[in-house]
Amino acid sequence: MSAIKPTYEELAQRVKSLESKLKDCLNVEDVPKESDEGYRSIVEVAPGAIMAIRNGYFLFVNPAGARMLGFSDPEEMVGMPVLDVVAPESQEVVAERIKRLESGKDNLPIKIALISQNGMRVPMESTSTSIPIGGISTAVIFARDISDQKQRETNRQQLLMQKQSFDELLSNISRNFLAIPIDQVEKEFPGAVQSITRHEDIDRCSLGTFSETEGMFRITADADEISTYTLPKGAEYQVPWFQARLKEKKLTYYSTLDELPEEAAKDRNWLAELKIESMVAIPLTVGGVCVGGIGFEAVGRSRRWSEEEIDKFSRIAEVFANTLARQKGDRELRAAFSEIRELKDRLEQENIFLREEIEIKHHKIVGKSDAIKKILSQAEMVAHQDTTALLLGETGTGKELLAHAIHNTSLRENRAMVTVNCVAIPSTLIESELFGREKGAFTGAMAKQIGRFEIADCSTIFLDEIAELSPEIQVKLLRVLQDGTFERLGSPKTIAVDVRVIAATNRNLARAVQEGKFREDLYYRLNVFPITVPTLRERAEDIEALVWFFVGELGEKMGRFIKKISPKSMEVLKNYHWPGNVRELRNVVERSLILNNGTTLELHLPTSLESEPPENLELENVERQHIINILKQTNWRVKGKGGAAEILCLNPSTLRFRMKKLGIERP
């Protein structure tokens, strides 16, 4: 069919009534009101796409929208079927949205994929509305290209995976060195050097050691070949300038041979013969004395070395230096080697947390209510500081999600955040979990354990349910907050760390201080920047957006494609008092998806939860009643499939602790 392009007067008349939408979508402070020509200018120069659609065909497309899809002239798109530029997986939802808009109904924002003229996918984030033009309802879509946003997320994941891969390389090298007798450790050096060459973007890696009696031992490896040899004692070495700098414990690197000074002429000639155009040379120091060096080389090409690469190479050198220190055998050098064990344990622990971070999907905090905007503003203010943050709020409000948002926006985002649920760890083990322990520190301590604060060095530690810590642990935590030091259980050695603390609790800490259950000095240390996370009751206007978010997240996993949600069901959700907050809402959506078979979702609240809210809405009473309701629903079964702990998203031991604390007993 042929489409009728709306007149400019029709569009201008409707643009006036959409000033607020234009402000959001076009990024302008004020929409001109002086003349229709002003509105036309806004539409023409808008950085986002603006498209008018009727009967499934384009009526109007602004220049930005045409450019996004590879059209030089917006007029080329007028009269074209909309679905011609929509990716196959987005066509059904786009068709449904346009149909709703043309019938005069608005839609929620969605993410879709379009196809440009050259066949490239263009991910879009769009919002839409229905406008009567010439007395006929017309769909108007505002969209922006989010390709850069998706690329940033991909790049972040790649950096995390690269860091994890490098840490695993170091951990494997350290483990191999520790697994064999010390007199045979040199046999592992060639394989370790070659594994480094294959892992890093270098052509060759060379390891050399000095010896006053046996000359200089040297290993050179590239991706395919390893050579080892010993220079005779007193033999003239080919790179005297580099050798002197190594013995002075100086790190040396160059990008091209021309950067070497005149006094390194002999070194330059020998390196040129080997075609080593670029190199980083790091001394191996044991007990304050250089015992050798390790070089990372680019052959036949120049290379600019970044600070991150030099830092990685320095960590590799540290592993070899500590191994050589162990080989020396005296007490001082043996003590230095014990640090490699700690490095190994720490790398393995950090890898666990890195894997968890890579596997966690990026969830943005959903909602546009004033309450959510306020806490996001507070989180942004504190994120770039090292200030301790205290997150307050009821169970299930999303305190941990907010902690991740603060950490991921901070200067410490390149290190994984360490999370500790203080109520989930038995009181007898919490000290060793937080601060670590030495072997034999207590009965059953069969091995040394690195504490969570050590693992979180130069990163962030999130202490959830901090009000449940015993007075003894509160004292130790206060010391860490004051001067950043502590001792492992069973060790007199003081350990210093640089850790940013984010704490959370669903209890009234000020009242706990008055009742003598929480230290006043610790409270003031934690309460530097408090953020109170709003309950779902305080942000009821966000419920619809949250439901659609969970439907998208969970529906994809379950193979459920939901087009509509029953308005009556949504109204029931908005009128419910939500003692379990966002976590409870997610569980309700998940349960409803399991029970649902069609494309229209009916949301089902459990019968025991559909009654009126209790008169006493104090937090502990609401929590107690909610737990009792769930236990009745499961016939008082706490753990296992379909048990109360699973429904409440709690560890069974955590639920039993809460039951005991709230005085809940099985009839």
Image (cartoon, rainbow, N blue to C red):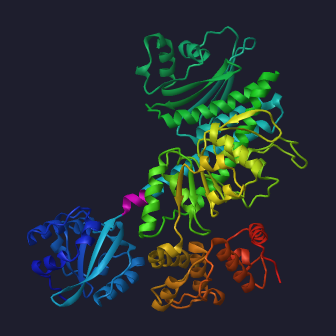
Q: Is residue 607 left or right of residue 666?
A: left
Magenta-highlighted stretch: main secondary structure?
helix
The quadrant of the rendering that contains the N terminus is bottom left
Residue under the point 57% across and 54% down: 390
Where residue 91 appears, as percent x and y from the top left, is 38, 80
| Quadrant in which the C terminus appears | bottom right
- Where is residue 88 drawn, in percent x and y? 40, 78
Who is closer to the viewer here, 539 or 310? 539
**Residue at position x 47%, y 73% in the image:** 539
Q: Measuring 37% from the left and 86% from the top, which residue is drawn there?
A: 96
Q: Nearer the viewer, residue 501 or 575?
A: 575
- Among the 4 quarters of the image, the one containing residue 661: bottom right
Q: Is residue 473 left or right of residue 26?
A: right
Above/below status of 231 relative to 486: above
**Quadrant housing residue 218:** top right
Query: Can the viewer see residue 328?
Result: no
User: Looking at the image, is 417 positioned above or below residue 440?
Assistant: below
Extreme-front residue of the structure: 514
What segment carries the magenta color? 146-151
Which residue is at a point 76% across and 53% down the rendered structure image?
470
In the image, is residue 261 above or below residue 373?
above
